[in-house]
Every structure is written in structure tokens, then in C-alpha cells.
Image: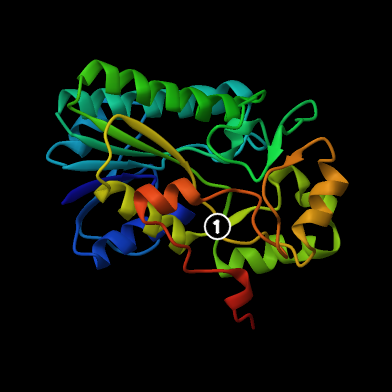
Amino acid sequence: MKVAVTGGSGLAGAAVVSHLLDAGCEVVSIDRRPPPHPISEFRLVNCEDLGQVYGACHGADAIAHLAAIPRPTQHSPDQVFRTNIMATFNIFEAAANLEIPRVVYISSMSVLGLPFSYTPIRLAYLPIDEAHPQAPQDAYALSKTLGEDIARAFVRRMAGGMSVVSLRFPWIHSPQTFQSVLKPLWDDPAAGASNLWGYIDTRDVAGACRLALQADTSGHEAFYVSAPNTFMKTDSLQLAQAYYPEAEFRTRLDGNQSLFDNSKAVAMLGYESQFSWEQYKWT
């Protein structure tokens, strides 16, 4: 399989590229900046330019679309929205016309409206699964929610000629970024509440992408995919009751169990998290 990976120079994208190469795939890494490590096929591409996307994706069997402005905090809202939406539309437009049958779209738990909402988000229930209502408010959450709408539109347009898997990840981290960014939040649970204290290791992101590329699915399917635990030492039930008292608890929460339900990804993709912060060895 030849896979075009957009955003291949980013934190998650670089892990996806490395993992797919190790799995025997042919990979074209696509980004607006050079990769952190040399790769034989790299294309310097602005995904807002459809012609550049056509050229970079030509000959690919599948696309993993990770390229995006990852948060709305360092760019203006219009820039976040325009960049993410145009990049996503262009990827699907190119995939349709180049007859690329499988696209993996990196969505986000932000379709819930978290963590960048302007007004508080009320959760209907916990743990979160794919049926939970979506309530985007900010430019980033809107771009990810509408990105899934774009995916569904192209699946309809291609009438069976394209299938799409949308992966809704929580906060993506490596062991190094976990230590510097998330570990300090052990003493400040309120700071992690808007993320539902959720995270996923970059290597599990990569594994989930490979499974999504290979999965026997049709149409459009969306999945929440996270680590099995929160990034906190505190029991999840205690955290949820303190910060989301309105939420119904649909299953028992054991220890620091994740507040995201991976069961659909387990059943349909064969996903099983391999990496947890409790295994990390920090210097």
C-alpha cells in the first residue's frame, strides 16, 4: 500500500509515517515544513492549494489526513477555520478525482465542543461514545465537525467508491511532551477538565491510523480512540463528579479509567492501546 500522509512532519504525523514505513508501506510524507528525520519521499505542499495536493497524492492507494492547525489559541479564528476546512476539502476532492478509495481523517474529541468552548459544555453522559451529542463553538471544533461532514459528502458522491474512517483523538502526546505538559496537571485537575483528562500516545495514534487504513469498513465511520486511562492519578469518578456533575454515568468507572469509550474502535478496527503514561520512564 502506498499512503500519502499529510502533516507528516508534525508530532503525530511523524509517528504515523515512521510506523507505516516499519509496517512495510510505501509512504509519501506531505507537509509545509521538512520532516524531523530524513524520508525518501517527502513533498513540500500547502494543502490549501488543490493543485499541489493533486500532485503529491497522485499514485497513492490511501491518504491519512493529519495536516491542520491543531488548536485555535495561536492563530486567528478565520485562519484556523479556513486552513483546516480548505485542506480537508482539497484532500477529499483530490482523492475523489484520483480514485483513491480509502481516506483516514484525523478528527478530534473537539467535536464535543471541548476543550476550547466559549461557554461551558454540558455532557449528557460518561464515558463518551460516538452517539454523544456534538456541540462545537470555536473555529477548531467547527473545522473538525465540518471535516467529518465533508467526509460523508464525498462518500455519498463516490457511491461506494470511497470509504472514510474519522478518528476522534483526545490530546496527543509523546512521553517527552507528557512529562513537560501533562504531568504538572496532576496537581491541578481543573486545568485538564476541559480535555476530560484524556490523552493518547503518538505511537497509538500511528497504530490506530494503520488499522483504519486496513479496516474492512464501508461508507463513513467515526471512532473515539484514546489511551485506556486519563493522564491523572485521581480516580475518574471523583473527577467527573466534581467537574461534570450533570453527566449520567452509564458504566462503572474503575480507577483512572478513560472517560472515552473505545469499544467501537476495538470491535471494528481491532484497536488496543499499547502505551500508557504509567509505563513511561522519565529522566
Q: Residue at the spot x=63%, y=62% of the render?
A: 229
Residue 212, image x, y percentages = 33, 47
The C terminus appears in which quarter of the rendering?
A: bottom right
Please identify the quarter of the rendering in which residue 113 is found. top right
Which residue ends up furthest to the left in the rendered image? Answer: 59
* Local secondary structure at mark 1: strand
On screen, residue 213 versus residue 2, left or right, reads right
Identity of the amino acid at label 1?
Ile
- Answer few, some or many: residues within 10 Å of disc 1's Cα (few below 14, many 20 plus, some between 14 and 19): many
Q: Horizontally, is 146 left or right of 24 in the view?
A: right
Where 235 falls versus 246 (above or below)?
below
Total tally of numbered discs in the picture: 1
Whether residue 20 can be seen here: yes
Q: How far across and down, in percent of the image, does residue 84 sit?
A: 47, 29
Task: Tell me which residue sits at (69%, 46%) in the image.
Answer: 195
Q: Residue at x 15, y 51 (%)?
A: 1
Residue 87, position as x, y percentages in the image? 39, 29
Taking the image as drawn, is residue 29 in sight?
no
Using residue 233 as the reference point, say whether residue 168 is left or right of it: left
Closer to us: 225 or 12 = 225
**64 is higher (above) or lower (below) than 144:** below
Disc 1 marks which residue? 200
In the image, 110 versus 225, the foreground residue is 225
Left or right position of 264 against 218: right
Q: Is residue 31 above or below residue 133?
A: below
> Residue 151's x, y, as percent?
36, 26
* Viewer-nearest residue: 36 or 252: 252
